[in-house]
Image (spheres, rainbow, N blue to C red):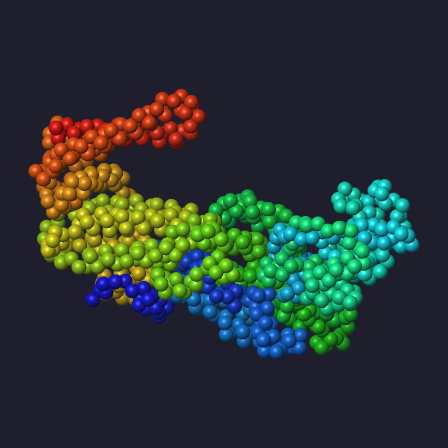
Amino acid sequence: MIPSQFNAAAVEKKWYDYWMKNNYFHSKPDHRKPYTITIPPPNVTGVLHMGHMLNNTIQDVLIRRARLKGFNACWVPGTDHASIATEAKVVAKLKSEGINKNDLTREEFLKHAWDWTHKYGGTILEQLKQLGCSCDWERTKFTMDPDMSASVIKSFVDLYNKGYIYRGYRMVNWDPEAKTTLSDEEVIYEERQGTLYHLRYAIEGSNEFVTIATTRPETIFGDTAICIHPEDERYTHLQGKKAIIPISNRVIPIIFDEYVDREFGTGCLKVTPAHDVNDKVLGEKHHLEIIDIFNEDATLNSFGLHYEGKDRFVAREEIVVELGQLGSIVKTETHMNKVGTSERTKAVIEPRLSDQWFLSMEELVKPAIKAVLETEEIKLYPSRFNNTYRHWLENIRDWNISRQLWWGQQIPAYYYGDDKEDFVVAENIETALELARAKTNNPQLEIHNLKQDPDALDTWFSSWLWPMAVFGGVLDPENEDFKYYYPTNDLVTGPDILFFWVARMIIAGYEYTGKKPFTNVYLTGLVRDKQRRKMSKSLGNSPEPLELIEKFGADGVRVGLLLSASAGNDILFDEELCNNGKAFANKIWNAFRLIKGWEVADVAQPESSKVAIEWYEAKLQQTLAVIDDCFDKYRLSDALMAIYKLVWDDFCSWFLEMIKPGYQQPIDRATFDKAIAMLEANLKLLHPFMPFLTEEIWQHIAERTPEQALIIAEYPKASAYDEKLIADFDFAAEVIAGVRTIRKDKNIAMKEAINLKVINHEKASVYFDSVILKLGNISSLEYVTDTVDGALTYRVKSNEYFIPVSGNIDVAAEIAKLTEELKYTQGFLRSVQGKLSNEKFVAGAPPQVIENERKKEADALAKIATIEQSLASLQ
């Protein structure tokens, strides 16, 4: 019994469980050609959002289509440990329980982190199943799995031994909320309006002052010099003098350096080497003292005097008040400047001097530049992102890979002495001990004499190995899985991590295997609302994905997302798109029910059905060619639209009407069998986009064994098709539309048979005459050479069609109506011809505009001729 309506909720779990039970998603190496995707691993603590929905729907479409086309399809899922985000969540949870992270040992904290991960870590992957994602769940990986962590450590040791990794004391980006350093790429710069404070510094031993300008008055406690250009005549008399910092009254030297722009501001620059990268350079050049005034959480330390312990922004306001009371503020003015913020926590970044681990990128990046920009061994879709890729990689800086966190892979450096250079790098402490003994020539060293670096590695340093590590390729490059599945085929991700992740995976792939990690990179756009705002929970404009699935069905949501998702372009999401997807599902379901509801008999096949089948087979092949071309260009939205039109317009609106048996009449078996075959072909094309609906219909059509499930059926094979047949039908469709228009306008019921006479100026094919007769309910179709008096007429191109007037037509009213229409069309024609006779317009307008105007002229002339003919036949 086929239900009267398609119930998405009732079928989704049923078929997903069926697919899982029969292990359709699992892949292992065999004789087939592999098609491999590795999922961009979402944060382990994350939940499904609209960006995930889009990204993973696209991946599922690609993997399901590959499976149908006979590839050994392998989609590896997994999650990322997201060190900064996860540690922040665990710290917040502990705080709510009255536990301070600093009171715990590393092992105690990591136990809490693993408990958190085990409790919440699988949420997003379970949600992806509700979307229909056909991942190989047996291959699910987590970036902190033992083998994944071992891969990261091996990579670090290898790069260190090659001389690429080094430890350096550098000015870094410090996130005071996460209490860790960040790489340059993890800092987002925002235009913000602030205040520029002009402050007076007294000159020691005189009544003179110099004025400096700063946006950060709290940093005066870290000043170690005032710098002036040596050729600035206003200040040459201050050579050898010293200045006094307001509030602290600390004395600092006045130095002279050409670095200072004497035209900017007052020409005097305060130098704070611990808190500005340029000041750091000046400090080193002039041997200045370095004073760090901040704690790791950006509160002021003891150098901040009575402001110690206060947040930097709170302290700023209070310091400004005190400076005003001291008469040290000359003036203030509004000032726009770029403020660096943490990509993860959104906290304002502090420049900070720190010992960190860096990866030298100058040599490593060269193969990655060549692969994308020169040989095109790897292609980005859309290709405009090549420019972004080029900018990042040609201006790449050394990568700060250490983080002051506990959640993550601990850096495998082991210290054996008090000097910061007293360390060795090894994959485990036992090897480290051997290295340390050899380096120090001290066989008495024991494991307890070694202390491992407390920092963890940047999460991206883990995930840049993802396509290799998920197949064990870092630890064992000769294993069967890695040799079979790597390089992978397609990567689907957002352009916001083109550098963070995509470029780095390419760098790692060539460094460790000499091969690309993937061939194609499909870059999706951001999902925005109808007002073009980025979707976010804070704006309240982001729908809950699971609620959308509940309301519209997973297939409806998938279609709604994909119809608006062209590569690289932002998606303007509207729930109505999902409603369109749901309506499409219902349309297909009703078409299936219509076919299955027909009585089948061993009767002769009508000519109209034979012709219809030939046409639809050609139309299917034409659409298949379009779909394949769209997939080759990663235009999935266009591919879906081509299928949508094929099914909705060609199959449901034309083909089924063409073959539908008469009222209470059976359909012949040959036509019915072909209709089912065409429906099955449609389902195969649709399955990657709408897996649940299509499997449900497929299984209703006939009893199927697990080996005959749609998910592993054979995709339609491309073959030659008759383009003229399709063009002839398009002409016939216009003829039918003309008949139907006249019926509607003249209130001639469809059940009332009419006659049709044709002057075939176009020498149009008569192959579809049987279809015209059926769909127009025409009792006779006659080809004539002269116009027919007393008939309603219309044209298709130059062909003239005549429908003799029946007695119930009000001839006088029809003449009046046609006369009015003739006057309007003649006026329109004069307007168009006026433009075309205007030499200035013709000379200045683009060719396309001129072409459109000439088409309007031709259409108007044809319409006038048809109306005049109709009037002549009625008078």
Report the residue at 64% width, 52% height from top.
193
Residue 20, position as x, y percentages in the image: 37, 68
Q: Quadrant of residue 435?
A: bottom right
Q: Is residue 692 left or right of residue 219?
A: left
Residue 70, position as x, y percentages in the image: 36, 56
Residue 376, position as x, y percentages in the image: 51, 45
Residue 48, compared with residue 255, is above or below; it is below
Q: Quadrant of the N terminus?
A: bottom left
Q: Quadrant of residue 75?
A: bottom left
Residue at far left of view: 807
Q: Nearer the viewer, residue 66 or 746?
A: 746
Q: Quadrant of residue 500?
A: bottom right
Report the residue at 22% width, 39% height from top.
734
Disc tally is 0
**Would you say residue 30 is visible in this rendering?**
no
Residue 563, position as x, y percentages in the image: 38, 51
Residue 361, compared with residue 708, is above or below; it is above
Q: Quadrant of the C terminus?
A: top left
Q: Nearer the viewer, residue 400 or 30?
A: 400
**Would you say residue 374 is visible in this rendering?**
yes
Residue 369, compared with residue 125, is above or below; it is above
Q: Nearer the viewer, residue 482 or 285?
A: 285
Report the residue at 33% width, 45% height from top.
625
Report the residue at 73% width, 51% height from top.
332
